[in-house]
Structures are given as C-alpha cells and as structure tokens.
Image (cartoon, rainbow, N blue to C red):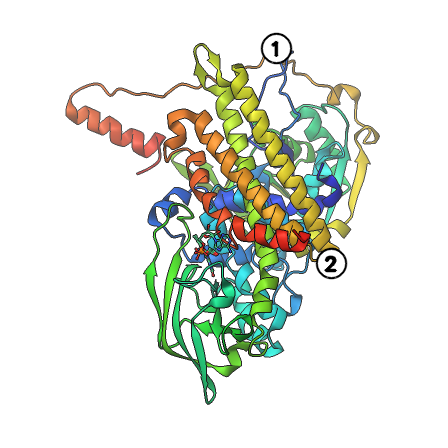
Amino acid sequence: MYESYLDETHTAIRESVRTFVKREVEPYLDEWEDAELFPREIYTKAAEAGFLALGYPEQYGGVECDYFHRLVQAEEFCKAGSLGLVAGLFSLNIALPPILAVGSEEQKQRFIPPVLAGEKIAALGITEPNTGSDVANIQTTAVRVGNHYVVNGAKTFITSGCRADYVTTAVRTGGPGHEGVSLLVIESSTPGFTVANKIRKMGWNASDTAELSFVDCRVPVENLLGGEGQGFQAIMHNFMDERLSMAVMGYACAELAYELTLDYARQREAFGRPLTGFQVSRHKLVDMATQVQVAKSFCYAVAARIQAGDMPITEVSMAKNFACDVADKVCYEAVQLHGGYGYAREYTVERLYRDTRILSLGGGTTEIMKEIIAKYLGI
Amino acid sequence: MKIAVLVKRVPDTTSVFKIADDNASVVTDNLKYVMSPYDEYAMEAAIQLREAGQAEEVIVVSLGDESCKETMRTALAMGADSGLLVKCDGAGPTSRGVAEALAAALKNVGASLILAGKQAVDDDASQVAERIAELLDCPHASVVSRMELVGDTLTVDREIEGGKYTLELPLPAVVSIEKGINTPRYPTLPNIMKAKRKAIEEQDINALGLDAAVLASHITVEAMALPRQERLTNVLEGDNETRVATLVKALREEEKVL
Ligand SMILES: Cc1cc2nc3c(=O)[nH]c(=O)nc-3n(C[C@H](O)[C@H](O)[C@H](O)COP(=O)(O)OP(=O)(O)OC[C@H]3O[C@@H](n4cnc5c(N)ncnc54)[C@H](O)[C@@H]3O)c2cc1C
C-alpha cells in the first residue's frame, strides 16, 4: 500500500534506525524514562549514525533527502516505544527550520552544523505561561539597546529546554499582535537566561521540558532571524512540518500499540481460549488496525503533496487531528486488551498510552487545528 | 589485498515465529529479514582493515535468491565495494552445499582474507566458514574476538570457554567473527545512495560445475516445535552458605550480571 512512496533506500534507513534502537536505546530506555532524561551522548551517537542531519542542506552538514526518508526515520524511532526520546532527540527539527528559512548565511553557518553534529542542542521557545495557542499574543519582550536586544519574560513547556544551547525564541520587538513578533536565537550561556524549572509530566518522560526565564538577557542583534516583525510568519510556516510529524508520531505509536496488543491477545488466555478467540476482542483489534491504516495512508498522501512542493495546510491540520485522535483511541484499547498488565510499567502500551496524550495538545491543539480547517474551508 | 565477507540473509530473531501446517517448516510470510548479526561484525572488521590501508577492496558474497540483494545492499552501504551473489532459487542447499558453492565461487575472487560471522542466527549450524577453509585448503580460526594484521600474518584471539587462544595465521585465511570485536557502523543515507550504484555480480549456482549430489540436501526435517516457554524458577537447596554460593555462581555464570 505504501510501496509507491518508498524504495529500497527507505527500507535501508529503517534498518539503520532499527539497529541503532536495538543497540543504543532498548537496553537503557526504562532507565531513561525513570530518570526523566536520556543521556546527552545519545545526540552525538545519533549524529554519528547520520540521523540528525537528514533533510538539511549539505553545506551545513546535512544530508539532502526526500520527505519520505525523514518520515520513515521518524516512524522507526517511534517504534522504540518512547515519544519522549523522539521529541527530545529531534527538537532540532522544530528549532532549526526557522533559521534555515529566514536566517542569514552567517547564522546558518553558525547555528546549524554543531546541532547536526550532535554537539549542541537546539530547542524552540514559543509557548509562555500566559500564552499558548494564541501565539500572536506572546509577551516576552526584546528591546533594542545598541547592538543588543534586552530580553525579559518567560517561556514554558520547552522541549529540550533544560539543556539546550540554542533556543529559537519568539519575542516581541514591536507593538501588539503578530506584526510585533520576532525570532531571536538565544544562547543558553547568555547572562540572564535561566532554566527556572524542569516540568514533570504525564508522559514524554525521557525528554526534558523546561520553563525558561529571561531577565535583562542581552542577546546580540546578529541573533535576530530575518527582520523585526518577521517572526510570526516563520513560526506559522514551521508549524506545518511539526504538525505532520506529530501526526506521524500518532499513527506510528498506534501501529506499535496495535502490534504489541495483537501479540499479547494471541498468547493471553481467558476462559480457556486466547483473547483473540472472543469476537469482541477480534473486532477491537480490527478497529485498531483499520484506524491505523487510514491515518497512515492519509499522512503519506499529505507528505507526498509536501514533497511535490505544495503547502497543504488544511490537510496537515486534518492529518494531525485524525492521527493523534487515532493514537489516543488505539492506545486506550491497547491498554484495555492488556487488562491489568496494560496498566503496569513493564508493558510498553502503558507508556504509549501516556506518551500519545500530548499529541492532541502540542504543536497546536485539536481545537486550534479545527479553527484553521474551518477558516480554509470557508465555514 | 582483497577481503571477501560472507553475509547471510536471515529472519530477524525478534520476529514472531509460527510453525507451518506441515509441522516441519516456519511460516515465512510477514517475517522481517536482516543481515545475520555476526556477519555485521565481520563486515565492520573488513572495512576497518581497508580504512587502515591494510586492504584495497572489500567484496560481499552471499548465496541465495534475488531477495539477498537487499541484505547485500546493506553491506554495500556499510562500505563494501562490490558484491557477488551466488544465485539459487528455492530452499537452497544445506551447509555442505552452501560451503561447496561458495568455495567454488571464491576461487575466482582472489581474496586473501575471507571473513564470516561465527554462525548464522537462523540455523546456527556454524559450518560454512570452517568447510570453506577446508575446501580452499586455508588456515582457519573461528569465534574470533580480536584480529590484527601485520604483513602477511594475522594474529587473532579465539574465544573458548573461560579463556581464549591467541593464534597466528598466514594469509590467505578464513576467519569467523564473534560479536563484540567492534561496533558495526550504521548505513547512513549518503552511503545507502552510493550503495545503489555499486555492482552486484551474479553467478548461477548450477554453473559452478558442482555435482548435483553435493548441492542436494542431506537433511530431512521430521518435525519442528517452538521452544516451551516456562517460567524458569530455580529453588536453591542446602544451607545458607551453599545457597549463597550457588546463587553467586548462577548470577556470575548464567545470568552474567556480576
Ligand atoms: C510535553 C510538551 C512539550 C511541549 N514542547 C513545546 C516546545 O518545545 N516549544 C513550545 O513553544 N511549546 C511547547 N509545548 C507547548 C504546547 O505547544 C502548548 O501547550 C499548546 O500550544 C497549547 O497551549 P496552552 O498549553 O497554553 O493551552 P491554551 O492555549 O491555554 O489552551 C487551553 C485549551 O483551550 C483551547 N483553546 C484555546 N484557544 C481556543 C480557541 N480559539 N478556540 C477553541 N478552543 C481554544 C485549547 O484547544 C485547549 O483545549 C509543549 C507542551 C507539552 C505539554
């Protein structure tokens, strides 16, 4: 069904990720989840294996590829069974694209190669304690004084924020509304930048999520991306990719939950027969498989349009809503079919259930997606 | 110097295996196939020798049907220069026939060093490398966990229970590799792309001039069964001192956690 999008190079990437996960992730994953952090060296290991560079231009240390190489790589990383790992390891994919899109040549040369090499960590800082969905209303200010912007304010829920070296940060350089929003790359070594809190979460536990504070944080004007007031456009543009990748996380986790549940249901016996011997369980599994395939094939179709150069904003928003909803439903049923074991840490479906809940919130909530779709459909 | 690395396509051992209705074979639909893990170490060892300037060329050699090419592409993406597929369709010969066919094909390759995994993880027969060494009349070391080449002499550590042998072998030689000798690299996308353009030569197994009797299977599978999955409970006997000693021994030797 997906063959028309893929060739043997995609299969080969998948194999590489699978080997990496087996060797570098699986043996330690439970430890990382408990410690609520994966070790920093995983960034360098993933970089050495060529995973961080995928999709970036060669002159910045990247490896050019098609959209589906990145998609299958993401799918396969999700199959490790920890979205925290995926979100943390790949926070560069939300932090770097704005630099690539509107940054100067000098900024690209400075910020991108060390991140792709796994030496520096990049994060994206948009959300604030008082403003999430309403991005145009962010309140962190950046006031120009000579050759610096003096930044004051706070960001929250920043993935990889606790140890990021570069935070692509939305700040207000102008008046109210989206015209006043700009993007600054803030280096965590800048005086006035502090990690105020590491947020403890329901899921995504292998990744760190930070509350950041900026107090008279002096950022050189060279770190402004594009011009003043160009931030909002760049943020919105960035969202398209982030949203589709969250949809990919959604169906990939749902697929994993389905596969694990099918295995379990075949082996687990109740009342003298395997769980698959009950029609109600079989139908449940069929519904899970159906939802996964429908979500996945829609995402592939949308990815193909992006690959062809389109900006299918409506469809990306639909894909995110649909696939993330499928993830919630399928993971719910996966836990249900596992019985009490589905509630035990030892079983991966327990983690998938917690890890997928965020997908309908992050990168734009389901409700915000619906607002976007309504607008584009003229409803 | 040329190095040949023998690589086998095997089902991923993490797959869920089912016995077919004939009770004597495995259902192969839906199985994922990979390069036998020990062969990955052999591939990496070969590439490291080439990168160290001790070999000029690495050729990956496999026996099987068309689908083996996928596994060979992985080897090419790891860095092998070219491939040779000894092509045979269907079930193919058993260990003896495989060794005979590969030895015959290798005669034309001119490799000074032939590397293989210590065993393939599907049948775990651990025969092919040894048989090839005999057929080619070369020295051979198996289960090798360290390898050093100085001039024409290869020094290897061969793992044995509770210790190791250090052996010296003159080239040409056949060596089968144990895991842990190195960390096999991951095929990266640029190398995967390059691998697409590398040549895989094909040689028909029936054109090697081998006797049909040599290639014939000499094994009949009577029946197959999945291992019984039991909780491995072990109640220790004796007084406290004996029980502690037994426990420590088990943790050290069986569970290998101490
Ligand atoms: C684990 C995790 C990681 C994250 N990582 C990052 C990151 O790296 N960088 C970053 O910048 N942010 C990150 N976020 C923040 C995330 O993007 C926001 O939580 C999200 O955008 C929602 O914003 P909010 O939490 O302020 O909710 P709010 O905007 O306060 O929304 C609350 C509720 O109101 C609804 N609502 C709001 N407006 C409307 C409307 N107009 N119509 C109908 N309903 C509406 C929402 O749908 C939601 O249900 C992360 C969050 C989490 C939990």
Dots 1 and 2 on the same chain: no
Residue of label 1: B222
The correct choice, above or below, for A221 with respect to A23 in the image is below
Q: Residue at x 44, y 82 (%)?
A: A143
Q: Is residue A293 above or below residue A283?
A: below
Residue A302 spot, x, y in % from top left: 68, 48
* Label 2 residue near ligand 1, CB within 8 Å: no
Question: A336 or B14, which is in the foreground?
Answer: A336
Q: Which residue is mark 2?
A: A309
Question: Residue at position x 42%, y 72% from top?
Answer: A140
Q: Secondary structure at mark 2?
A: loop
| Rendered view: A242 above or below B14 | below
In which quadrant of the rendered image does the N terminus of chain A lie?
top right
Between circles 1 and 2, the one closer to the viewer is: 2
Which amino acid does the dot numbered 1 rest on?
Glu
Q: Which residue is at the front of the view, B91 or A76?
A: A76
Question: What's the residue at 63%, 40% (across, down)?
Answer: A296
Q: For the residue labelled by badge 1, is the local secondary structure a helix, a strand or a loop? A: loop
Image location of residue A303, percent across then percent down: 68, 50
Residue shown at the point (59%, 64%) measured from the top left: A97
